[in-house]
Image (cartoon, coloured by chain):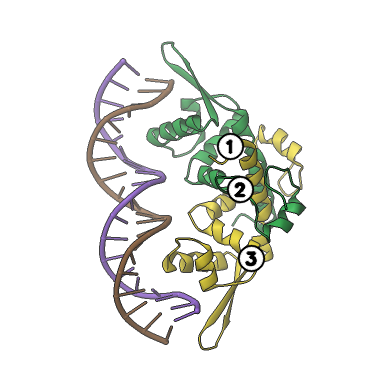
Chain colours: A green, B yellow, C purple, D brown
Amino acid sequence: MFTLRDRITYEEFLQHIHEGIVTEAGGCPVTPVLTLFQGKWKNQIIYTLCRCGTMRFGALKRALDGITNTMLSSSLRELEADGLVTRMQFNEIPPRVEYALTEKGGDLMPIFYAMMNWGLKYGNK
Amino acid sequence: MFTLRDRITYEEFLQHIHEGIVTEAGGCPVTPVLTLFQGKWKNQIIYTLCRCGTMRFGALKRALDGITNTMLSSSLRELEADGLVTRMQFNEIPPRVEYALTEKGGDLMPIFYAMMNWGLKYGNK
DNA sequence: CCGTATCCTATATGATACTG
DNA sequence: CAGTATCATATAGGATACGG
């Protein structure tokens, strides 16, 4: 048997999934990621920041078609609280604030990659 | 340039993400997967069916702690409509219905694997 | 046993107006 | 420019009861 402390390959993952996975104390390691991908905007914000690099509030708003001030603001705050996004405030007139992905946020990209591959195989309809 | 018709490696994915990805006509290939992972139950149903194989309605309900008849039923119907789950009905008394993952559903596992790796690296708190 | 029908509530999201 | 405050609404999810 193994614990999830060990690195395992995808093949090992598939094998052991059937016999139940011994998780670290405290629960399933997938759950927090699932929480992140809930909701309409956070995943798009993460993807956009990865694609475009550092961005200002207004640029993000323009890139995310249809998002409101309220949702962008609250989403960014939660992402910052979770350590996925950094917020750099410059005290200038007019004000400037820049957002960027942290390494922790960028490390979500393999998940997007896996999702893309599934989407490519099975279509986007 | 490339279109997403081609298979690309993760490294290529990361490179090209910055210059924008040319998607197949009709939109982003990640979007349908994102939709699947929205909500509280569908992902747990998929994972449970992969872990346990073919399962009856009642067994699924017991495995998914707290799910109601309503949610399990409607979720299964949507998963079936999307081709991720098969439904086998046996006309016996008492009635028996068995659910199982399709190949399309099982092919979502690399996404869970990627999520697990992120969770292992960054903790499940 | 395997659901459906009905009703209810909480939360996520949207719209609009306003400020340092 | 970069937000906050306030109010409105849609949808997801839950509770309960009943039926083939």
Amino acid type assigned to the residue bearing label 2 in the image? Val
Q: Position of residue A65 (x, y in %)?
A: 48, 38
Quote the CA–CA distance across marks 1 and 3.
33 Å
Q: Are dots 3 and 2 on a single chain?
A: yes
Disc number placed over residue B104 in the picture, else none: none
Residue that badge 3 annotates:
B52
Q: Chain of mark 2?
A: B
Q: Are marks 1 and 2 in contact (CB under 8 Å)?
A: yes
Q: Position of residue A53 (x, y in %)?
A: 60, 27
Task: Please name the residue shown 65% across and 58% down the image.
Answer: A20
Frontmost residue, A61 versus B116 = B116
Task: Please name the residue shown 47% across and 69% down the image.
Answer: B73
Disc 3 is placed on an element classified as: helix
Task: Locate residue C16: give its quadrant.
Answer: top left
Residue that badge 1 annotates:
A47
Amino acid type assigned to the residue bearing label 1 in the image? Tyr
Say how many tags the image has: 3
Q: Which part of the image, by quadrant, shows the C terminus of chain A? A: bottom right
Q: Chain of mark 1?
A: A
Amino acid type assigned to the residue bearing label 3 in the image? Cys
* B55 with respect to B71 (left or right): right
- From this view, report whether residue A53 is shown above or below residue A7: above
Task: Please name the residue shown 45% across and 62% down the image.
Answer: B67
Residue that badge 2 annotates:
B30
- Neighbours of disc 2 within 10 Å: few (<14), some (14-19), many (20+): some
Q: Position of residue B32 (x, y in %)?
A: 57, 53
Q: Chain of mark 3?
A: B
- From this view, report whether residue B96 is shown above or below residue A4: below
Disc 2 is placed on an element classified as: loop
Q: Are dots 1 and 3 on a single chain?
A: no
